[in-house]
Amino acid sequence: MTDMRFKTTLVPSDTGAYIEIPFDPNEVWGEKERHHITGSIEDHTIRGCLESRRGGFILSLGPAWLRGFEGDAGAEVEVVLAPEGPQLDTLSPDILAALDPEPEAKAFFLSLASFYRKNYVRWIESAKRPETRSKRITEMVELLKAGQKQR
Protein backbone atom coordinates (compact mmCIF):
# COMPACT_ATOMS: atom_id res chain seq x y z
CA MET A 1 0.00 0.00 0.00
CA THR A 2 1.04 3.53 -0.70
CA ASP A 3 2.43 5.77 2.03
CA MET A 4 1.04 9.27 1.71
CA ARG A 5 3.35 12.20 2.53
CA PHE A 6 2.14 15.76 2.86
CA LYS A 7 2.50 19.01 4.78
CA THR A 8 -0.44 20.47 6.65
CA THR A 9 -1.35 22.62 9.63
CA LEU A 10 -2.39 21.42 13.08
CA VAL A 11 -5.88 22.86 13.60
CA PRO A 12 -6.83 23.57 17.25
CA SER A 13 -10.00 21.93 18.57
CA ASP A 14 -11.85 21.66 21.89
CA THR A 15 -10.20 18.33 22.67
CA GLY A 16 -6.71 18.96 21.27
CA ALA A 17 -6.06 19.36 17.57
CA TYR A 18 -6.63 17.66 14.24
CA ILE A 19 -5.14 17.58 10.78
CA GLU A 20 -7.11 17.70 7.56
CA ILE A 21 -6.30 14.90 5.14
CA PRO A 22 -5.62 16.43 1.68
CA PHE A 23 -6.56 13.29 -0.25
CA ASP A 24 -9.43 10.82 -0.36
CA PRO A 25 -8.28 7.62 1.41
CA ASN A 26 -11.06 5.67 -0.35
CA GLU A 27 -9.46 6.49 -3.70
CA VAL A 28 -5.88 5.87 -2.56
CA TRP A 29 -6.27 2.84 -0.27
CA GLY A 30 -9.61 1.42 -1.39
CA GLU A 31 -13.18 1.91 -0.26
CA LYS A 32 -13.58 1.20 3.47
CA GLU A 33 -16.02 2.06 6.20
CA ARG A 34 -13.09 3.10 8.44
CA HIS A 35 -9.46 3.82 7.65
CA HIS A 36 -7.15 2.72 10.48
CA ILE A 37 -3.76 4.31 9.90
CA THR A 38 -0.23 4.35 11.20
CA GLY A 39 2.56 6.78 10.45
CA SER A 40 4.22 9.89 11.80
CA ILE A 41 3.75 13.59 12.29
CA GLU A 42 7.11 15.38 12.44
CA ASP A 43 8.78 12.02 13.25
CA HIS A 44 6.37 11.37 16.17
CA THR A 45 4.57 8.04 15.76
CA ILE A 46 0.82 8.15 15.27
CA ARG A 47 -1.88 5.48 15.07
CA GLY A 48 -5.55 6.18 14.72
CA CYS A 49 -8.67 6.14 12.66
CA LEU A 50 -9.52 8.76 10.06
CA GLU A 51 -12.85 10.50 10.60
CA SER A 52 -15.13 11.69 7.84
CA ARG A 53 -15.93 15.38 8.24
CA ARG A 54 -17.21 18.16 5.98
CA GLY A 55 -16.84 16.19 2.78
CA GLY A 56 -13.26 15.18 3.64
CA PHE A 57 -11.30 13.31 6.28
CA ILE A 58 -9.46 14.38 9.43
CA LEU A 59 -7.17 12.76 11.99
CA SER A 60 -7.89 13.84 15.56
CA LEU A 61 -4.96 14.32 17.91
CA GLY A 62 -5.82 14.24 21.60
CA PRO A 63 -4.17 16.10 24.46
CA ALA A 64 -1.96 13.12 25.36
CA TRP A 65 -0.44 13.04 21.86
CA LEU A 66 0.03 16.81 21.88
CA ARG A 67 1.94 16.67 25.21
CA GLY A 68 4.68 14.66 23.47
CA PHE A 69 4.75 17.04 20.51
CA GLU A 70 7.03 20.07 20.67
CA GLY A 71 4.95 22.30 18.38
CA ASP A 72 1.65 24.04 18.97
CA ALA A 73 -1.72 23.90 17.28
CA GLY A 74 -1.37 26.09 14.21
CA ALA A 75 2.12 24.76 13.40
CA GLU A 76 2.89 23.43 9.94
CA VAL A 77 3.84 19.75 10.13
CA GLU A 78 5.09 17.01 7.83
CA VAL A 79 2.87 13.91 7.86
CA VAL A 80 3.37 10.34 6.62
CA LEU A 81 0.34 8.02 6.75
CA ALA A 82 -0.23 4.42 5.66
CA PRO A 83 -3.04 1.93 6.25
CA GLU A 84 -2.48 -0.24 9.29
CA GLY A 85 -2.58 -4.02 9.40
CA PRO A 86 -3.21 -6.65 6.75
CA GLN A 87 -4.53 -5.12 3.52
CA LEU A 88 -5.99 -6.89 0.51
CA ASP A 89 -2.72 -6.74 -1.40
CA THR A 90 -0.94 -8.64 1.40
CA LEU A 91 -3.47 -11.46 1.85
CA SER A 92 -2.77 -14.90 0.44
CA PRO A 93 -4.54 -15.84 -2.81
CA ASP A 94 -6.86 -18.40 -1.18
CA ILE A 95 -8.15 -15.87 1.36
CA LEU A 96 -8.67 -13.30 -1.39
CA ALA A 97 -10.49 -15.88 -3.53
CA ALA A 98 -12.88 -16.57 -0.64
CA LEU A 99 -13.54 -12.88 0.05
CA ASP A 100 -13.96 -11.70 -3.55
CA PRO A 101 -17.41 -13.27 -4.16
CA GLU A 102 -18.62 -12.07 -0.73
CA PRO A 103 -18.66 -8.24 -0.84
CA GLU A 104 -20.31 -7.91 2.59
CA ALA A 105 -17.68 -10.07 4.27
CA LYS A 106 -14.88 -8.32 2.39
CA ALA A 107 -16.12 -4.84 3.34
CA PHE A 108 -16.55 -5.86 6.97
CA PHE A 109 -13.05 -7.39 7.06
CA LEU A 110 -11.55 -4.18 5.69
CA SER A 111 -13.46 -2.06 8.22
CA LEU A 112 -12.08 -4.01 11.18
CA ALA A 113 -9.30 -2.65 13.33
CA SER A 114 -5.89 -4.10 12.56
CA PHE A 115 -5.99 -6.29 15.69
CA TYR A 116 -9.02 -8.23 14.45
CA ARG A 117 -7.75 -8.56 10.87
CA LYS A 118 -4.40 -9.87 12.13
CA ASN A 119 -6.11 -12.39 14.40
CA TYR A 120 -8.17 -13.81 11.55
CA VAL A 121 -5.08 -14.09 9.31
CA ARG A 122 -2.95 -15.65 12.09
CA TRP A 123 -5.67 -18.20 12.81
CA ILE A 124 -5.80 -19.24 9.15
CA GLU A 125 -2.01 -19.21 8.70
CA SER A 126 -1.54 -21.42 11.79
CA ALA A 127 -3.40 -24.35 10.20
CA LYS A 128 -1.02 -27.22 9.60
CA ARG A 129 -3.14 -29.15 7.10
CA PRO A 130 -4.63 -27.77 3.87
CA GLU A 131 -8.11 -29.04 4.73
CA THR A 132 -7.98 -27.26 8.11
CA ARG A 133 -6.90 -24.05 6.40
CA SER A 134 -9.74 -24.34 3.89
CA LYS A 135 -12.27 -24.97 6.66
CA ARG A 136 -11.00 -21.94 8.62
CA ILE A 137 -11.24 -19.68 5.56
CA THR A 138 -14.83 -20.77 5.01
CA GLU A 139 -15.62 -20.20 8.69
CA MET A 140 -13.98 -16.76 8.62
CA VAL A 141 -16.12 -15.68 5.66
CA GLU A 142 -19.30 -16.84 7.44
CA LEU A 143 -18.30 -15.02 10.64
CA LEU A 144 -17.53 -11.83 8.70
CA LYS A 145 -20.86 -12.01 6.87
CA ALA A 146 -22.54 -12.27 10.30
CA GLY A 147 -20.66 -9.16 11.49
CA GLN A 148 -18.39 -11.00 13.94
CA LYS A 149 -15.16 -9.19 14.76
CA GLN A 150 -13.55 -12.37 16.04
CA ARG A 151 -14.16 -16.08 16.09
Image (tube, rainbow, N blue to C red):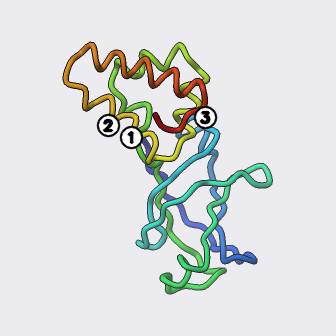
Q: What amino acid is found at the position of numbered circle 3 in the picture?
A: Glu
Q: Does residue 34 appear to the left or right of 91 in the view shown?
A: right
* Residue that mark 1 sits on: 119
Q: Residues within 10 Å of mark 3 (few under 14, many from 20)?
A: some
Q: What amino acid is found at the position of numbered circle 2 in the picture?
A: Arg
Q: What amino acid is found at the position of numbered circle 1 in the picture?
A: Asn
For image coordinates 35% across by 18% down, the residue present is 94
Q: Nearer the viewer, residue 75 or 98?
A: 98
Disc 2 and disc 3: Cα gap in Å?
24 Å
- Label 2 secondary element: helix
Which of the 4 quarters of the picture holds residue 22? Answer: bottom right
Disc 1 and disc 2: Cα gap in Å?
5 Å
| 2 vs 3, front mark | 2
Percent position of residue 102, x then y? 55, 17
The reply to whether discs 1 and 2 touch (Cβ–Cβ < 8 Å) is yes
- Label 1 secondary element: helix
Q: Does residue 19 appear to the left or right of 86 in the view shown?
A: right
For image coordinates 49% across by 61% down, the residue present is 47
Disc marking residue 31:
3
- Label 3 secondary element: loop
Disc 3 and disc 1: Cα gap in Å?
22 Å
Q: Quadrant of the N terminus?
A: top left
For image coordinates 64% across by 66% down, the residue present is 60
Residue 120 versus residue 20 in the image, above or below = above
Q: Earlier in the sequence, mark 3 or mark 1?
A: 3
Q: Does residue 56 appear to the left or right of 6 in the view shown?
A: right
In the displayed orientation, state which residue is furthest to the front: 151
Q: Nearer the viewer, residue 19 or 124?
A: 124
Q: Nearer the viewer, residue 37 or 27?
A: 37
Q: Residues within 10 Å of mark 2 (few under 14, many from 20)?
A: few
* Residue that mark 2 sits on: 122
Percent position of residue 42, x then y? 46, 73
